[in-house]
Image: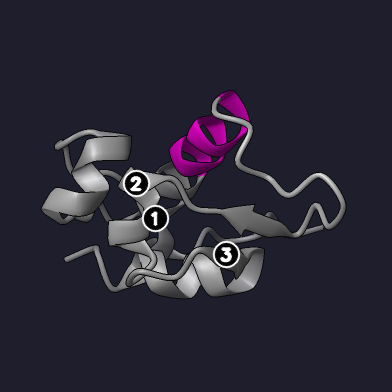
Amino acid sequence: MAKRKVNAAFMKPLTPSTALAGIVGTTALPRTQVVKKLWAYIKKNKLQDAKNRRMINADTKLLAVFNGKKTVNMFEMTKLVSKHLS
């Protein structure tokens, strides 16, 4: 069985915006690592909605990343985060 090829686009280090750097740091990271660090931050600060685990409640740092939205779902989060990577 052939080994699955890793998508190079996912592994390319991207630079986070100033708003995002406040959460994941200023070093260029692959998109997968950015999302991983974001989830660590969300869990550490208990920002996952208690009733609906798919929803993330933004704190002051996340508000800047989420374009001022107070709550976003997981899928919306990855879309909004990608706008903060270059």
Mark 1 lies on residue: 31
SS at badge 2: helix
Image quarter in which the C terminus is found: bottom left
Q: Residues within 10 Å of mark 3 (few under 14, many from 20)?
A: some
Q: Residue at x 81, y 44 (%)?
A: 50
One can see residue 7 in this view: yes
How much space separates mark 1 and mark 2, taking CA atoms? Answer: 22 Å
SS at badge 3? strand
User: In terms of depth relative to the viewer, which is nearer, 83 or 86?
Assistant: 83
Location of mark 3 (residue): 71
Counting other residues with Cα less than 10 Å from the Cα at mark 1, is it few (<14), some (14-19), or many (20 or more)? many
Distance of mark 2 from mark 3, alpha carbons?
A: 12 Å
Q: Residue 10 placed where, x, y %?
A: 42, 61
Label 1 element class: helix
Q: Is residue 9 visible?
A: no
Chain-order first, disc 1 or disc 3 = 1
Disc nearer the start of the sequence (2/3): 2
For marks 1 and 2 on the same chain, the one whose residue lies earlier in the sequence: 1
**Residue in view at x 22 percent, y 38 percent:** 22
Q: Is residue 3 left or right of residue 30?
A: right
Q: Which amino acid is tagged 1?
A: Arg
- Residue drawn at the location 50% of the way across and 63% of the way down: 70
Residue on which disc 2 sits: 60
